[in-house]
Image: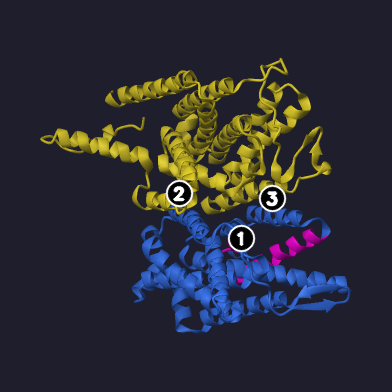
Amino acid sequence: MDYFVILLLQIGSAVASLVLLSIGLAVIFGMMRVINLAHGEFLMLGGYAAITAYNKGVNLWVAMIVVAPLTVGLFGALVERLVIRHLYGRLIDTMLATWGLSLAMIGFVTVVFGNTVSGISAPLGSLQIGAYRTGVYELFLIVVAVILLLAGWLVLRYTRLGLIARGTMQNAAMAAALGTNPSAVYAVTFAVGAALTGLAGGLLAPLSGVVPTIGAAYIAKAFITVISGGAAILSGTAIASALLGAINVVATFAFTSVLGEVALLVAAVVLLRLLPQGITGRFFRRAL
Amino acid sequence: MKARLLSIIGNLAVLAAGLAVLFGLPALGETYLIINSTIFAAFAILALSLALIWGYAGILCFGQAAFFGLGGYTYAVTAINMGDTTVPALLAVLVPALFAALLGYFMFWGRISDVYLGVITLTVSLIFYRFINQTAGEQWNIGDAPLGGFNGIPATPILNWPGRPGEQLAPEEIFSLTVGLLLIVYFLCKALLATSLGRIIVAIRENETRAELLGYDTRVYKLAIFVVGGALAGLSGLLFANSVFVSPTMFSLPVSGQIIIWVIVGGLGTLIGPVIGCILMQFLTNYLGTLSQIKGFGWVDPNLVLGVLLVIFVLVVPKGLTALVADVWRWSVGFLRKPRAAAPPAGERVPNP
């Protein structure tokens, strides 16, 4: 019984971290059809922002939930203005340019912070379930992931901003003809996506620590989750995270953690072969 | 007529440059230089493999490193078990080719498009990377060969003369073999592109639907070129294993990324461009690596410089160095002949050498 509860909690926490890892990428990909290969480095930057702020004496929660998203959001706005804007509609070129950006960010952070692991210990202590222990912080991340998805849904469904976003997503030319300014929409989208990524980076920093090259560990998972999810930003990410996260944890429990990762990747490849447009390209087409 | 002449001159120039390197470098007698050049030449074959499938067939493979590593590991494992290296060397090309056939069948018959294809190839190379990384320990021995996990197989056997195990090739001989193979592969690629297969592949890149409506089964042609690309990457892995040794890094994301950078810096849609791009970027990486060790130059991180360079190339010179050189050349010719029209007529474009 305890074992089962722990397994469920582990699955929940794996799914939550996949949602956190990929939501920013999903917003940018879903809205703009831009694949940001520097996504992993945005996460890394969020982690460094949170840790640096914390070491400077800022409250840990403020550092993770306010400083990290603000820093990365501003950086994202800058990147959009300087690089991405010039490459709209050139998917492959955007991927390559953001790849270059990711290398440059790794190099820059290595120079500034050195190639060492920095970390902060996870707050909130731990919880005893029968013979097992689990961190309360991991449960907190599950709550954050749910809140983010819910908030995203509310914004998209009920606000004017959400209406504009959905309109641009469905038909950018028509939305422009009706008076929205697509380049402003895209700029805001990229900044929001970057801010969400920064938030995720800040929140995940206590669990994984940060090194300049940590982005590489994140990017593939995030990338795969978003692509398997398909066009719908929220439901696609949620469903793909749930599926891949569950497969990962079950395989980890059954075999080793590396085989868990491998199982996740294999599952994603098979999924894409069966549903080349992603899960929401085939099912739940009208979902957000 | 003029275009044809230029292309012959271009081929001769490449051949002459290749032969000069092949016979000139060993004469200098510097072992360090020779080993480094061997690595460069092995990488250049890897660059050619992606030049073929991305530049000409339009298949953006983010995981070319998978075939590279597979070639290296196949060679190392079979060579340790068999002693003689002739069959392992052949297997190092065959196994990646077969794997490319399998993966290609999976992708092209699934009609998977650009981005998704990129993700799948990237994922496959990551699977290999993760898997090989954890193969430390006895239970992962294949025959006599330990896979060695994170450390790779430092005792990767060196090629020997066919049928004479024990008579290993000297570094100079490995160098000659690698540069010789690079030249052969380069001209084979040229020849391949001149056949009808090559023409159809370019047609598919330009417009897949149209090629299909003309009656070509585009899946078969894409698969064919993908397999050739896989085989070449395997060959490159074999040669790399002989000049360094095999380790999980061969499968890693930075390797796949590097190949893409070589191709885009050199010039997409050319063969000589990626080779030049590869050699230039390798020189630059090595140079920056040594420079960043010197005090006061700590800010010159290779990643930082390469990354900025890649962004600039994509934004400013998206067609790469070869196209840039061709443009500058055309412009200066036009400038010298000012009285006449500056731009050559459309039918007479300067071919890429």
Say which of A115 and A28 sits in front: A115
Both marks 3 and 1 on one chain: no
Location of mark 1 (residue)? A218
- Quadrant position of residue B235: top right
Q: Which mark is residue B306?
A: 2
Chain corresponding to yellow in the figure: B
How far is disc 3 from disc 2 in space, using C-alphas? 25 Å
Residue reaching furthest front? Answer: B295
* Mark in front: 3 vs 2: 2
Which quadrant: the N terminus of chain A? bottom right
**Colour chosen for chain A:** blue
Position of residue B136 in the picture relative to residue B29 (left or right): right
Q: Main secondary structure of the magenta part?
A: helix
Viewer-proximal residue, B76 or B352?
B76
Q: Which residues are magenta?
A: A225-253
What is the quadrant of the C terminus of chain A in the image? bottom right
The structure residue drawn at horizontal position 66% and vertical position 69%, both measured from the top left corner, is A17
